[in-house]
Amino acid sequence: MEKKVRFGLIGVGKIAPIHAEAIRSAQGGELVAVAGRREDKVKAFAETYKIDGYTDYKEMLKRDDIDVMVITTPSGTHADIGIDVAKARKHIMVEKPMDITLEKADKLIHSCEEAGVKLSVIFQLRFMEESRRAKALIEEGILGKVVLGDGYLKFHRSPEYYRDGGWRGTWEMDGGAALMNQGIHGIDLLQWLMGPVKSVYALTKTLVHDIHAEDTAAALLNFENGAIGVIEGTTSIYPDLCQVIQIQGSKGALSLKGTEVPKITFLETMCGRSERVTDEWADDLGEGHRLQMEDMISAILEDRAPTIDGYEGRKALEIVLAIYESGRRGQPVELSLKTS
Ligand SMILES: NC(=O)c1ccc[n+]([C@@H]2O[C@H](COP(=O)([O-])OP(=O)(O)OC[C@H]3O[C@@H](n4cnc5c(N)ncnc54)[C@H](OP(=O)(O)O)[C@@H]3O)[C@@H](O)[C@H]2O)c1
């Protein structure tokens, strides 16, 4: 029989069922246990998925039949929990952002290296077919010299979203708001498509929500390859305008739209390749998570690094933190990119 990679899940909140379904549908994966803090929630979740439940994740870590722990707790807990998981010699899949400071992100990376376990940071949009097509088109040079790379990350979130979450929109546990929680997906896609960001110059504000962190931000980006870009991110507007990434070059342009299932909605090049499809989007949460689970499963079976390892995962975090720093200082901020 095919050897299954066995998963445990830490955190039983909003995103946890997406992970449970993704693991169940991933080829070669099996979900065997879950851990949370509240007994009623853990019990209900464990019953739904017919798995074991724990109210202390450290008890679950004692099991020697679990290969990977998936961390879906609030962002500011990721590194601390991840370090415990690494010490228990389990591989880790951690939700974005990998934590809310670079210091904690680096501690997590180093703990995984020391323990010899794999670390995968969830940015599921990179695994979607159309995101990969956009990346291939740019690498093929079909857009010519890339000139502009923009991320419009304009979402609606209700007051209840922040009020009921408790940790959301707090500097202590969310590490920010509109960019650190929602916008970071598009920021990761943008830097993956465009290459590293050298410096940022930003304005950040809290305009609508009753939170301490920013609900609206704009930043000018200076990419290492010489291109220029902008990021506009918010959770304060109505209606939700979704996530749009636009890349324009000397010979063509493309636009990638969608929060969960990005689609190329516009492509026009001098060499005659052109597509204009509807601007509407329909999102199906979960497909990207499944694809990233399958990447982790094959990374374990083939003993290779997962596609988005800790170093890949920290890139978008560094950009968000530089934007916040620039917003605070009112000055441009240079990034000091680490690649290994
Ligand atoms: N990739 C994506 O598209 C995506 C989408 C949504 C969220 N996320 C990420 O997923 C993470 C969780 O978000 P969410 O919306 O699911 O949050 P949530 O609904 O608040 O759920 C968080 C869960 O973690 C538990 N928890 C909190 N602190 C803990 C601790 N110290 N130890 C153990 N468990 C703890 C909570 O328990 P209680 O119930 O006791 O509070 C709750 O079960 C965040 O990092 C977020 O950025 C990613």
Image: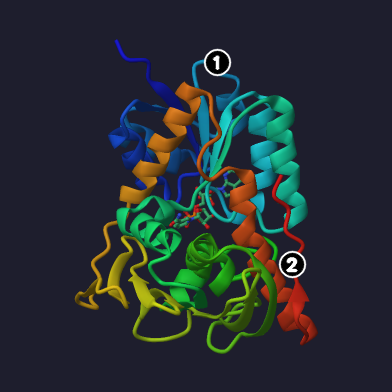
Report whether 229 appears left or right of 253: right
Which residue in the protein does label 2 denote? 335
For image coordinates 78% across by 52% down, the residue present is 103
Residue behind label 1 places its C-beta within 8 angstroms of ligand 1: no
Front residue of 42 and 29 = 29
Residue 43 visible? The answer is no
Q: Position of residue 202 (x, y in %)?
A: 67, 83
For image coordinates 50% across by 22% down, the residue present is 66
Answer with mark 1 or mark 2, whichever residue precedes in sequence.
1
Left or right relative to 203: residue 166: left
Give the amino acid at mark 1: Asp
Point 25% across, 74% down: residue: 272
What distance separates the C-alpha of mark 1 from that of mark 2? Answer: 41 Å
Image spot of residue 102 (x, y percent): 73, 56
> Camera-side residue: 54 or 97?
97
Which residue bears the numbered disc 1? Answer: 64
Task: Tell me the kind of residue under disc 2.
Answer: Leu
